[in-house]
Amino acid sequence: MHQFLSFWWRCAKIAAKGSFAFANDWQWLLGIPILAGLFSYIRGTATVTFFSNAIIDGIVVAAIVFAITWFVGLGIRLANAPVRLFYREKDRADAATHALTEKITPQFTVSFDQEHRGIVVAVERTEIVQPGVYGGTRVTVGPSFSASYLRISVIATSAVAIKNCQAFILFLEKQANPDETFIHINLPQPITLASEPFDVIPGIPRMVDFMKASEQDNKLTRTGYWPYALVNCFSDTATYRFTIAVNGDGVTAKPIKVDVVWQGVWNRISANQVEET
C-alpha cells in the first residue's frame, strides 16, 4: 500500500507542476463554459450570480472558474503523469547504467612527454662473467655508467585495472635532415616492448621503455628484443619516428607517434609526441 500511495503522490506532484499556468491560460475555454453549464442545469439559466454585488460576484466567479480549470488541468496531467514518471526514471536509470558501464569498461591512454618521465637517466652496472675457482662461472659487477631511457606512459582512465597489456612498435621511420621527408624502415613484425604482459592500475601511470642510449657505448639502441637484421638501423644521427600501440583487455588504444632526435650523444637525446591533425 505504501508503494502505491508513494507512486501516486509522485505522479500528483508531477501533475501539479504547470497546472496553475494551464488554468490561467485555458479558463476562458474550459472554466467559464463548465460553470455556465452547471448553473444552467441547476438553476435553469446560464446567468452566474451569487450576491447582489457585481464586484463580489465577479471575484467569486473568477475564483471558481480558475479552480474548475485547475482541477481539469490537474486531471489531464495526472492521467499522463505515470507515463512521464516512467520515462523520467528510465532516462535516469539509462544514464546511471551508461555511467557505470563507462566506469567499469577498460579504458586507457598512451602518451609520451619528455618533461614528465618520458626521458630518464639511470645508473647501470655491467655484469662480468669469469670462470669459477672450482669450475662453473662467477658473475661480478663491473663499473657503473649512466644511460638515458625513453619511455611511453600508459594510464588507465577507467576505474578498473587494465589487464594483460602489451606494447608494440608498429612502424619505424627515419628522417636524415629536417627538410627531408621520412622514409620507412621495414620491420619484419611488430616489435614487442615488454618481455611479459603487464597490468595498469587506475591512477598510477605505467612506464614502458622502448629506447636507450648509454655513456658506455654512446649508441641509440632498443631496450629489449630487436631483429638482428636491423641491428645497425640507428647508427646515423637522424630523427627516428616510432609508431607505438598498446593493447590491454582486448582493447587497443589509439597508436601514438614519437619522434626521437638522435644527435650522437647519449645525454643530448630528445623526443616529442607527434600531434595528429
Image (cartoon, rainbow, N blue to C red):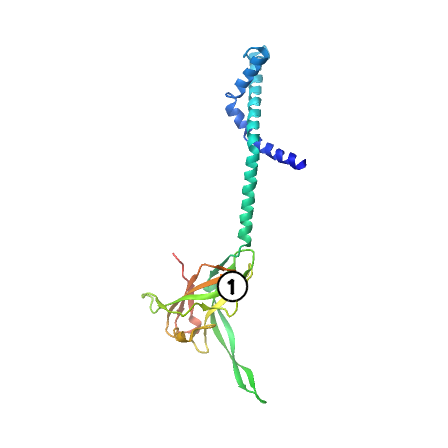
Q: Quadrant of the C terminus?
A: bottom left
Q: Is residue 210 above or below residue 66?
A: below
Q: Quadrant of the N terminus?
A: top right
Q: Residues within 10 Å of mark 1 (few under 14, many from 20)?
A: some
Q: What residue is shown at x 52% (from left), y 78% (from top)?
A: 125
**Residue 117 in view, yes or no:** no
Q: Is residue 232 left or right of residue 26?
A: left
Residue 46 versus residue 262: which sits nearer the camera?
A: 46
Which amino acid type corresponds to the residue marked 1 in the rendered image? Cys
Q: What residue is shown at x 49% (from left), y 75% (from top)?
A: 146
Q: What residue is shown at x 56% (from left), y 25% (from top)?
A: 72
The image position of residue 52, as x and y in percent, is 58, 10
The image position of residue 4, as x and y in percent, is 65, 35
Residue 154 versus residue 124: which sits nearer the camera?
A: 154
Which secondary structure lies at badge 1? strand
The image position of residue 247, as x and y in percent, is 49, 62
**Residue 156 in view, yes or no:** yes
Residue at mark 1: 165
Residue 216 versus residue 208: which sits nearer the camera?
A: 208
